[in-house]
Amino acid sequence: ATDLSKIPVVICPGFGNDAIDYLNPLDQGEDYGFVNALIKRGFNPDLITVLPLKRYEWIRVAGGLFDIPNFYTMTCTPEGLGYGWYIKRLRRTIEEVHQKSGGERCLLVGHSAGGWLARACLGDGSWNVEQLNSNDVEISEDNTTRAADRVRALITMGAVHKQPEKEFEATCVTRGALKYLNSEYPGAFLANEGISYVSVGGDAIVGKEKQQQKAVADDDVEKIGSEQVNTVYKDRGEGSASSVAYTSYAAVSGIGELTGDGVVPLEWTLLEGSKTIVLDGVLHSINEAGTTLPTDKWYGADAQVDRWLPEALKEAGIRVDGNKNDQQSNIFDSIQKMLSFED
């Protein structure tokens, strides 16, 4: 069996997310964080890194406006002004973690937009050392280093892997960057070099326009969101979880009447050529879409991680001693309960 405590993990935040969202989501406490869920399952806290990112930094995506004429001709590339800063920082972070772990290849976990940006980071498989030296990381001048020497597997959760359908491509918020990625480095592009690909998608909410709410099919009756969040949406005049999902799905794909995790349509989260895992009832992020209501139904919640992590590790060639992991998790839970009792 593989010792998970020796395997580094790099988490790639999604659009609008801050690193804190994976450590202490909505200020609920670190016990509720995705990082804590990984620690409970045997990963080493010193080798789990969330890409250092503040929420306000996403304004840098607006820098794409100055990527002329590409922004206006829908021909932006991932390395351009809009997203290049994220990709460079991610490469630096992967390099730092590689050295800190003593040369182990990392698990790259991309959430939401972090999924396609992680693919862009891997790119054609070359490892651009010039972009890393600015962070005072000691890197050998060996230009034969490949992305596969640094990354063992890419696991994506609720990622957008496809641009909108052809007739809606002009609405793509990446202004062509995602289309470029899928044209140049499609699907599980570096699988033949030894990088495993796993894409996890949620099947929780069916998108419906407001006026179609009463026409929800019997089969979809369970995919309409919680009563609590629907009350919030109704009070704000936004309709329901289904209509909010409809708007989001349409923005991502061009089509609103699809099923998905409430933000990204299921079909868009599943990367061609990857190991795909579909999770019923799982939502996109730490909060119900567009609200501050926390949820334990998102991909990284402690209650959901075991639904995809073991399968993902298996795909990455990591054999885990299940009994040992269960024991670690139980001990971890017991210690946390004792500490909370003392408080």
Image: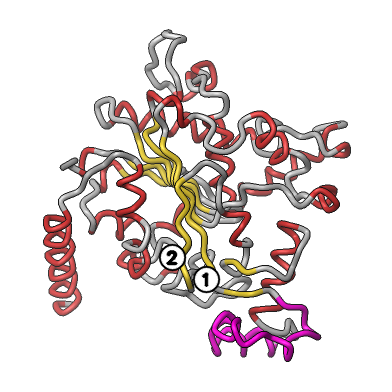
Give whichever of 88, 134 is nearer the camera.
Answer: 88
The image position of residue 140, as x and y in percent, is: 38, 11
| Viewport quadrant of the N terminus | top left
Location of residue 189 (image quadrant)? top right
Say how many tags the image has: 2
Is residue 231 a member of the stretch shown in magenta? yes
Residue at position x 26%, y 42% in the image: 318
Q: Identify the residue under disc 1.
A: 287
Looking at the image, residue 2 sits to the left or right of residue 36; the answer is left
**Contact between labelled residues 1 and 2, with CB atoms less than 8 Å apart:** yes
Q: Secondary structure at mark 1?
A: loop
Please give the range of residues in magenta: 208-235
The image position of residue 36, as x and y in percent, is: 30, 59
Q: Amino acid at mark 1?
A: Asn
Above or below, 111 relative to 145: below
The image position of residue 24, as x and y in percent, is: 39, 62
Give whichever of 202, 112 is nearer the camera.
Answer: 202
Location of residue 38 (image quadrant)? bottom left
Q: Amino acid at mark 2?
A: Pro
Q: Which mark is residue 25?
A: 2
Residue at position x 69%, y 33% in the image: 183
